[in-house]
Image (cartoon, rainbow, N blue to C red):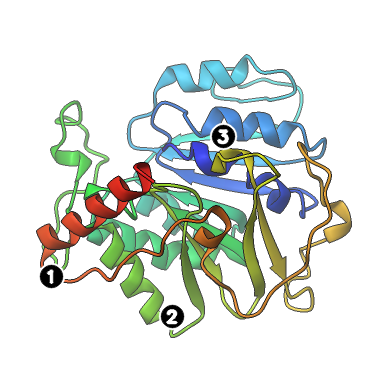
Amino acid sequence: MSYQNVVRPLMQFLSYFEAPRVLEIGVDKGQTTFPLCHNLSMLERSWLYEGVDIKMNPDVAMTVASMSTIFCPSTEPNIPVPPNVLFYEKNSLEFLKDAVENEIKYNLILIDGDHNYYTVQKELELAQQLALPSTIIICDDYSTKWAYEDLYYAESEGYEENDIATKRQKTEKVGVRPAIHDFIDKTEGQWGVLPGPGVCADYCILYQTENVLDMRFHIPPDITLANLGILEIYFDNNKCPEVDESRMLNLDYVYQRPGPRSPIRQMTEAVDAPELPPLVGDAKQKQKILDEYRENLKNG
């Protein structure tokens, strides 16, 4: 998956934890994997990254293995130290089911596998069972063409013989965004969603409403790019014992956090971006609204 706009801003959040654990569904070419693993290594503590894909690119593991202090048994199964990067060539739904059975928990879950209603909703239903009180889930393609269209990799070029990929399922709805919103509705307010900060962010952030006091995006003075900002998340520490703010690090900037606001507001306010207009009509009409919104942002 590709989350260049959020990998760096996430580091303040990940520094809250004694040994942060991250799951990425949809590794692709490692666009997120490489900077994320590098940044985690700079926290100077134990950490674990796990990447899942139905077609693992061997160059990803080889590139990660070339980074100092990062150990990946995919390239060297006999490394003499505990690994901090693990890759799995596996169907995401099968991986998530196994993780639930083994009661594994993650601090951060990134979802960018199949871009379709069926898979995303199933992934979210399983992923919430892997969440700690402070865990956030980031879903890609919230504002791309796949927001209201289905893509199954099983039908894509290069995956014709891939037996791991999920086959097309018949669903009343299509697209990533309806899957996310239906998941939110089913949780009856337990989970909330905010669009990613910055201009034309493709992703959204899911958080547990009772545990997050506020979420905001800090952009240092004279900085305009969202990928150079900091995602600030304020937790109710009584409900999130795994959060230890005394561990918090800012790898790039030294500044005074302003503290939480109430209630949580759209993070787009921090970068002066207009709020996304209501999405109405059929899939084509909704996609047209999204395209026009993104074009307006680009043109200022």
Seen at 24% across and 68% down, the residue is: 279
From the viewer's perspective, tell me whether residue 37 is left or right of residue 234: left
Q: Amino acid at mark 2?
A: Thr
Q: Residues within 10 Å of mark 2 (few under 14, many from 20)?
A: few
Mark 3: which secondary structure? Answer: strand
First in sequence: mark 3 vs mark 1: 3
Residue matched to label 1: 281
When asked about the image quadrant of residue 134, the answer is bottom right
Seen at 67% across and 25% down, the residue is: 71
The x, y position of residue 197, in whole percent, is: 51, 53
Seen at 59% across and 74% down, the residue is: 264
Residue matched to label 3: 86
When asked about the image quadrant of residue 252, the answer is top right
Q: Nearer the viewer, mark 2 or mark 1?
A: 1
Question: What is the CA distance from the residue labelled 2 to the residue labelled 3?
Answer: 31 Å
Q: Is residue 144 above or below residue 156?
A: below
